[in-house]
Amino acid sequence: EDSGKAASVVGASKISDDNGVIMLPERYDKNGMPTKLVIYNHGAGGRVTDTYSKITFSSFAKLLTKKGYAVMEINGVPENMRNENYMSVADNGSAAHMGGWVFLRSLANAYKYVTEKYNIERDGCFVIGQSMGGITSLNVALSGIIPVKALALDAPVISAFHDAYFGGGWSSGTLGGS
């Protein structure tokens, strides 16, 4: 693996195909000390596709890789599940980023994949959630599905039940309903 470059984690999920990337630190050593992992959970407008990932453009993610951390981001819901009735609550599948069971299983599979493929610490990771990624990150930490050392939230949405399930929210352009 080339240091500092994003490596694809496509297909990490066993429930279905999901997209993801991992940015390795500049001094990544596959045989040295294991690398600390930061999982970044994007907001509702974020995506990871074959050609785009928010973290690959993030100065914060680049700073973390310079400091020796690996940074991972996954799409959150396999693309072929986005149009299922339970995932199409919002205009672009935003409700899919609430950290429900589909996301948690996908993340657990991606975490297992990167800890087996790369020299990543296996005793826990750091989780960062931005905007809608806040509720996702909180659910990751509370679920115990992967070991979390620390949780950081940036402008988090941490309660979206009413907006996602009773109208309003992203599809109407305002939180709190119509």
Image (cartoon, rainbow, N blue to C red):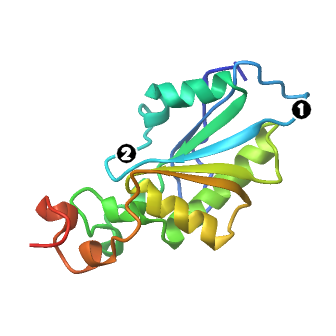
> In the rendered view of the protein, which quadrant contains the C terminus?
bottom left
Seen in the picture, residue 162 relative to 75 is either above or below; the reply is: below
Cα distance between the residues tagged 2 and 1: 32 Å
Seen in the picture, residue 105 relative to 31 is either above or below; the reply is: below
The residue lying at 33 percent from left, 76 percent from top is 161
The residue lying at 47 percent from left, 49 percent from top is 75
Q: Is mark 1 on a helix, strand or loop?
A: loop
Residue 81 appears in the rendering: no
Pick the residue in front: 21 or 158: 158
Q: In which quarter of the image is residue 35?
A: top right
Name the side, left or right, on which 89 lies relative to 130. left
Q: What residue does disc 1 label? A: 33
Pick the residue in front: 154 or 22: 154
| Residue 111, percent from left and from top | 69, 52
Q: What residue does disc 2 label? A: 46
| Residue 10, percent from left and from top | 57, 43
Name the side, left or right, on which 47 lies relative to 145. left
Residue 177 appears in the rendering: yes
Pick the residue in front: 97 or 69: 69
Q: Which amino acid does label 1 sit on?
A: Met
Seen in the picture, residue 3 relative to 91 is either above or below; the reply is: above
Pick the residue in front: 168 or 159: 159
> In the rendered view of the protein, which quadrant contains the N terminus?
top right
| Residue 40, percent from left and from top | 54, 45
Q: Which amino acid does label 2 sit on?
A: Gly
Q: What element carries label 2?
A: loop
Look at the numbered discs 2 and 1 and tell me whether their residues touch, using CB distance below 8 Å: no
Q: Residues within 10 Å of mark 1 (few under 14, many from 20)?
A: few
